[in-house]
Image (cartoon, rainbow, N blue to C red):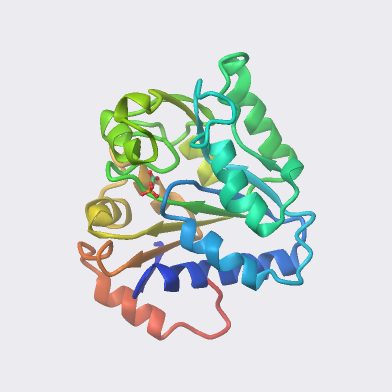
Amino acid sequence: MAEVIIVADKAAAGALVAEEIARLVRTTPDVVLGLATGSTPLPVYEALPALLDGVDVSRVRGFALDEYVGITPGHPESYREVIRREVIEPLGLDPARIRVPDGSLDGIEHAGEDYERAITAAGGVDLQILGIGTDGHIGFNEPGSSFGSLTRVKTLTEQTREDNARFFDSVDDVPRHCITQGLGTILRAKHLVLLAFGAGKARAVAAAVEGAVTASVPGSAIQLHPHVTVVADEAAAAELANADYYRYTFANKPAWQGI
Ligand code: PGA
């Protein structure tokens, strides 16, 4: 079962997850981080610089979850740019060690395989940060995605395009295709940390954590992984049937256990 930690707010979630990432960087300087984009991981990225102050981050490696296909290189909402702006620069990471799937049309047929090879060559992802879409997607694995899927091109649902329209001038500007790590790729990471905030995520969180394991809810793939931490605020946790048990478990957690 995933460990579910219900926190007061985004800042508390950010501090908790950033603490674990900082611990990893201190103990494993060439740690491989799985980086998510969107609004959800921002509290983690915002908490990290203070915790990494004075820590050597020059060898930290990272792999983003996904990228839009065909988006103009340098577009501020391409995930390559988002990762540069929100992660690489504030944390002072080496850009050469941080990969984002290549969404350019030229070579898109083999971009997924290239990405998988790079992750494997790096020894796999140590800690994968995840958000969850209102439709239950993780990465950009929309409902119906195979649990065995690897990095590949997917078609975004209209729901996801509408959810992401806030980052663009209009919904028409949101690309229709993406290249995303598959559920099979995500499941290979050593530790999954899924964050969720706000009432809009409550249904997806409950379905992913407590519902049936089904490709119709890609987030439910986390139930197949041996080490998952779900960090949710009260609103996102509101539909969890076992919320009291999760609170009790966390309150009584042995001090020697990390997340
Ligand atoms: P969000 O997106 O963090 O912007 O809410 C999450 C997701 O789509 O995975």
Viewer-closest of 105 and 145: 105
Quadrant of the image for the N terminus? Answer: bottom left
Residue 189 visible in the current orientation: no
Viewer-closest of 210 and 68: 68
| 254, above or below 94, in the image | below
Q: Quadrant of residue 109?
A: top right
Residue 241 visible in the current orientation: yes
* Image x and y of residue 179, in percent: 50, 28
Q: Quadrant of residue 194?
A: bottom left
Viewer-closest of 211 and 109: 109
Give left or right: position of 217 versus 254: left
* Image x and y of residue 140, in percent: 42, 36
Give left or right: position of 134 versus 61: left
| 223, above or below 65, in the image | below
* Image x and y of residue 124, in percent: 66, 46
| 86, above or below 28, in the image | above
At horizontal 62% and vertical 43% (from top left) the residue drawn is: 63
Give left or right: position of 181 versus 170: right
At horizontal 72% and vertical 44% (from top left) the residue drawn is: 95
At horizontal 51% and vertical 48% (from top left) the residue drawn is: 36
Give left or right: position of 186 versus 167: right
Viewer-closest of 234 and 80: 80
How many numbered circles does the render carry?
0
* Image x and y of residue 248, in percent: 33, 82
